[in-house]
Amino acid sequence: MSWKALREFTRTISFRLNLWHAGIFLFSAALLFTLIYFLLGAAIDRKDRDVIEARLREYHAVYENGGLVALQDWTTRVNDARKQRMFFVRLKAPDHKVLLMVTPQDWFDTDVALLDRGAEGPTDDWIRAARNTEIDLTVASMTLEDGTILQVGRSSDSRAALLGKFRQVFFAVIPPVLLLGFVGGAFVTRRMTKPVCSIVEAASAIINTGCMDVRVPERPAKDELQDLVLLFNRLLQHNEDLFRALHDSLDNVAHDLRTPLARLRATLEQALPESGGAAQNAIAEALEEVDRVETIIRTLMDVAQAEAGLMRLDVEPTDIGLLVRDVEELYEDVAQEKGVQVVNELADPLIVPVDAARMRQVFANLLDNAIKYTPAGGLVSISARHDREVELIFRDTGRGISGTDLPRIWERLYRGDKSRSQHGLGLGLSLVKAIVQAHQGRVEVTSMEGQGTKFRVFLSLQPQLQRAR
Amino acid sequence: MRLLVVEDDKKLATYIVKGLREAGFAVDHCADGDEGLTMVIGGDYDAAVIDIMLPGLNGLALVQELRKQRCAVPVLLLSAKASVDDRVRGLQTGGDDYLPKPFAFAELLARVQALVRRGSRAIEPTTLEVGDLKLDLLRYKVTRAGRKIELQAREFALLEYLLRHAGRLVTKTMILNHVWDYSFDPQTNVVDVLVCRLRNKVDKDFETKLIRTMRGMGYVLEGS
């Protein structure tokens, strides 16, 4: 369950936004670090080299002018004058014989050896070697015109140590900054995407409950999301108005038809006992017609309401088997009278979330049809299957429906030519379809002319509440 | 028994009032919601028949107001509106029963009588009798002229219902509601079939026929 919740969470915009944000932040920080790291390294190098290079040029000039003796003299003087930090100076003959070497006081013999180890290659080069973790030795070499090699160098603060310190600081600072950014980002994106979440909530509340008056809470902010919320609410209002108008006009039509019908019935009922003979027959017939018209109005209204999504459904877990048995009982006598055998193959309780009264109406219509179009000696069977959804099958051995009629049987008031002689309103199947669809289910029909018809009703086992999610 | 009918349609009102008077009720009538409210509160009525669409205060508001003023008169609501919604709303606001228009007067009468009876509960009889037909509710036995008649459960329920309304008109809708607890019209007339079967057992072999068909209206069970 928590694994699912986690997956649900990682699916959210706010999480992904935050992840991207953190990724980009980390990438640019790393880039910046690398850049600064190398620039810093180069800057440290440059600072040391500039000083040494100046000194190298100085010694070079002295040697050019006065030769070895002048250089010896100069180094002694200079080193005396600048006690604080002495330079390493060495002059080597082309055959590597050392002509002159001045080592600062803080240099050891090992330092010279360290330098020589790296100085076998080209002489006109820089050598930088780490004596230990704190001190670096830097030496510049120069080959003079007469082939002698002049080397000037000194010790400096370790570059590695400096850079190491920088690295340390960077790695110490980045994780908390990243964490802070992630948490802060989560907070901000959550706040920003809240309107989207409330839109989703409002939409699913309307779909689940059918309550049209749900609105998305509005915030004081004036951004695009707020615009979206406002527009969405206006759309909902518009929908609700249309919905209500449709509902009202249906109600008005019904009212305008039923009121005169009620008066007509009152008049006829009053006249009936006072009349006699042919007149009485006519009035009785008229009364029966009033009943029929009323049924048509009622069914038409039901179909219209169900199709428009206005039908009020009291959906509750209901044993479908029980409903089928109810309906079977309703038609038991009629079927017996007609010599049609009705077999109910439903055995186990089948609990499905439906409006019991409406679903009973569906089954009654289907059974009514099956019995009506099945000749004496025929068989009507009701069976069910279920896996992810429930399938109810009403099968008869009647005369079947012709290929031309088959696709049109669901239309309002459509009657195949052959069925015109039968009683019925031609509305039964429209109502069946409308009610089943209002339950988010579906109906299918297959028929073989002369062999029978099979109606199948598919209903979801999941309550509507969960389906919309 | 005093009744009040609040209905603005003149024709319908006249018919209802006349019918209820013939059935032995003292009936007052008014055509306006506001007037209806003062009349119910002022008068001592045993039940009221109130239309939902009324000039002035509408029927639902009227009932709501009555209940708010702790007036417990049983109310039968009439409505020409389309949907089950109205029925639900009517019963939620405090109506005791609901009848959609158009209706057969017999059904209105039956419902009014049920409402009035609710107030004063009479002792339930254990046997019902019309002419030489006897129905024993305790032993589930039916005899006619001393001869035992075997009935199915549904036939028994129908006969009991007809006997309880002996001498009065019973419509097909009423039978459908009572015997099958079914409120939609099945296309095939299941009521006719059941009445026919009952007749075969109760009336066929006897001189006097007790169950009469009133074409266009329903059935009446009565002795000669």
Image (spheres, rainbow, N blue to C red):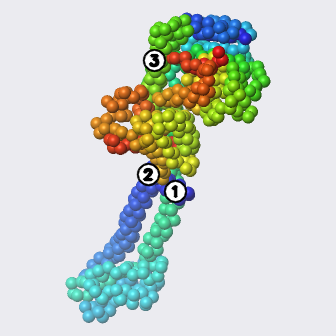
Residue type beneath disc 3: Glu
User: Going 70% across and 34% down the picture, which residue do you hit?
Assistant: B140
CA distance separating discs 2 and 3: 68 Å
CA distance separating discs 2 and 1: 20 Å
Quadrant of the image occupied by residue A235: top left
Are the residues under badges 2 and 3 in a single subunit? yes
Q: Which residue is mark 2?
A: A17
One can see residue A126 in this view: yes
Q: Which residue is mark 3?
A: A289
CA distance separating discs 1 and 3: 61 Å
The chain containing the residue under callout 1 comes to A
Q: Position of residue A5 (x, y in %)?
A: 53, 55
Image marks 1 and 3: residues in contact by CB distance under 8 Å: no
Nearer to us in this view, A449 or B43: A449
Q: Element under label 3?
A: helix
Left or right: A413 in relation to B182 = left
Image marks 2 and 1: residues in contact by CB distance under 8 Å: no
Image marks 2 and 3: residues in contact by CB distance under 8 Å: no
Q: Look at the picture and state if B28 lies above or below B205.
A: above
Q: Element under label 1?
A: helix
Judge depth for marks 1 and 3 and give the one in front: 3
Q: Which residue is mark 1?
A: A4
